[in-house]
Image (spheres, rainbow, N blue to C red):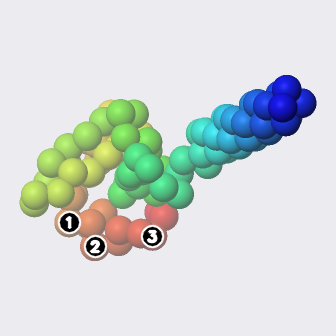
Amino acid sequence: MQGLGSLLLFAVFFYFMMRFGCGTHTVHGSHGGRDGHGLPEAKDPVCGMPVASGDGYAMMFKGRQHRFCSRKCLDQFEREPDRYLSGEGVAR
Ligand SMILES: [Zn+2]
């Protein structure tokens, strides 16, 4: 049963090739579109720009963390936080 053995081995090998090929594609794909899921992305309440976690400036305000794309936006927010929080979700 040498033929069957190698056929089975080939099938298993092929199965793993498919699996790993698929896995690599999934990882590659999720890397590009990780905005939707995975790491949470915050929105700069001042200019409305999306700020990835680990990027820009962070500030705790009323128990919530807000992220800003630049120091300028953070300064603006510190001056009038309520103005930007009331308009959260609206750019500009
Ligand atoms: Zn900004």
Which amino acid, by three-letter code, is at mark 2? Ser
Q: Earlier in the sequence, mark 1 or mark 3?
A: 1
Which amino acid, by three-letter code, is at mark 1? Asp
Disc number placed over residue 90 in the picture, else none: 3
Identified at 10% across, 58% down, the residue is: 63
The residue lying furthest to the right in this view is: 3
* Badge 2 density bin: few <14, some 14–19, many ≥20, Cα 10 Å: few
Separation (CA) of disc 2 from disc 3: 9 Å
Query: Quick one: 20 or 8, which is closer to the camera?
Result: 8
Disc number placed over residue 86 in the picture, else none: 2
Q: Quadrant of the N terminus?
A: top right
Give above or below for 69 relative to 84.
above
Image position, residue 62 (x, y; %)? 10, 60
Which amino acid, by three-letter code, is at mark 3? Val
Identified at 48% across, 55% down, the residue is: 37
Identified at 35% across, 33% down, the residue is: 54
